């Protein structure tokens, strides 16, 4: 058997540019066409209708990734896929994303949903910042979680340590 015949086809990851807020639809449509698509996502806190909520959104807004075999997969149908604008190109040619970058993204977002897995940020003993209310901007130590929506924190105010109960929505972990 010749060396050329035993070689596996070269697979590469390409960045795909999507229409605004249509990354999930673009991923689904590409997968329906038989492509392997990857949309890394992250959970973040947003204020919606006056309340802080955890929202899962794309890690790179308007971008997702597609794996293709050069010389075997036809890349032309990608730009006419619903939700997609086209492949990211440099000099008119689609450029592969470095394999090391893709390996790290896939390691950080291992689940089938592609959501970045982070450790629980609010644990007793952690340093937190108060986001709003009369103590906004103050740093505190998280003493305990009091149910699903409240926490006890230790605030240093006027030279004294004070224990205060605050809604979890008002706290953010310090780096």
Image: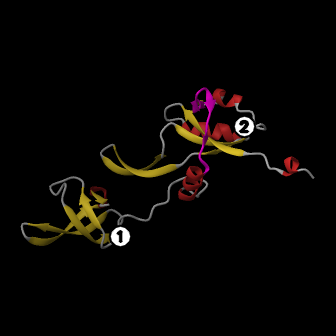
- The relative height of residue 8 versus residue 17 in the rendered view (above or below) is below
For this rendering, which residue is in front, 106 or 92? 92
Q: Residue furthest right?
A: 1
Where is residue 26? Give x, y as percent.
60, 36
For this rendering, which residue is in front, 150 or 158? 158
- The relative height of residue 162 versus residue 109 in the rendered view (above or below) is below
Report the Cα–Cα distance between label 1 and label 2: 44 Å
Q: Which residue is mark 1?
A: 123
Q: Residue furthest left?
A: 158
Image quarter of residue 141: bottom left
Q: Is residue 88 magenta?
A: yes
Mark 2 residue element:
loop
Part of the protein shown in magenta: 86-99
Characterize the local packing of mark 1: few (<14), some (14-19) or many (20 or more) Cα atoms within 10 angstroms: some
Characterize the local packing of mark 2: few (<14), some (14-19) or many (20 or more) Cα atoms within 10 angstroms: few
**In the rendered view of the protein, which quadrant contains the C terminus?**
bottom left
Q: Is residue 50 magenta?
A: no
Q: Residue furthest front?
A: 3
Q: Residue at x 93, y 52 (%)?
A: 1
Q: Which residue is mark 2?
A: 33
Q: Residue at x 48, y 42 (%)?
A: 60
Where is residue 9? Give x, y as percent.
78, 46
Image quarter of residue 16: top right
């Amino acid at each position: 058997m010749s060396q050329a015949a035993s070689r596996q086809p070269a697979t590469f990851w390409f960045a795909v540019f999507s229409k605004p807020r249509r990354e999930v639809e673009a991923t689904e449509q590409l997968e329906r066409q038989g492509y392997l698509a990857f949309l890394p996502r992250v959970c973040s806190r947003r204020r919606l209708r006056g309340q802080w909520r955890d929202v899962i959104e794309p890690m790179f807004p308007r971008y997702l990734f597609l794996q293709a075999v050069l010389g075997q997969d036809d890349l032309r149908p990608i730009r006419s896929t619903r939700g997609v604008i086209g492949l990211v190109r440099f000099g008119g040619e689609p450029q592969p994303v470095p394999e090391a970058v893709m390996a790290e993204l896939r390691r950080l977002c291992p689940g089938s949903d592609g959501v970045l897995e982070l450790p629980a940020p609010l644990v007793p003993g952690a340093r937190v910042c108060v986001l709003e209310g009369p103590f906004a901007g103050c740093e505190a130590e998280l003493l305990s979680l009091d149910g699903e929506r409240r926490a006890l924190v230790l605030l240093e105010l006027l030279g004294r340590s004070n224990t205060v109960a605050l809604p979890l929505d008002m706290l953010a972990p310090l780096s």
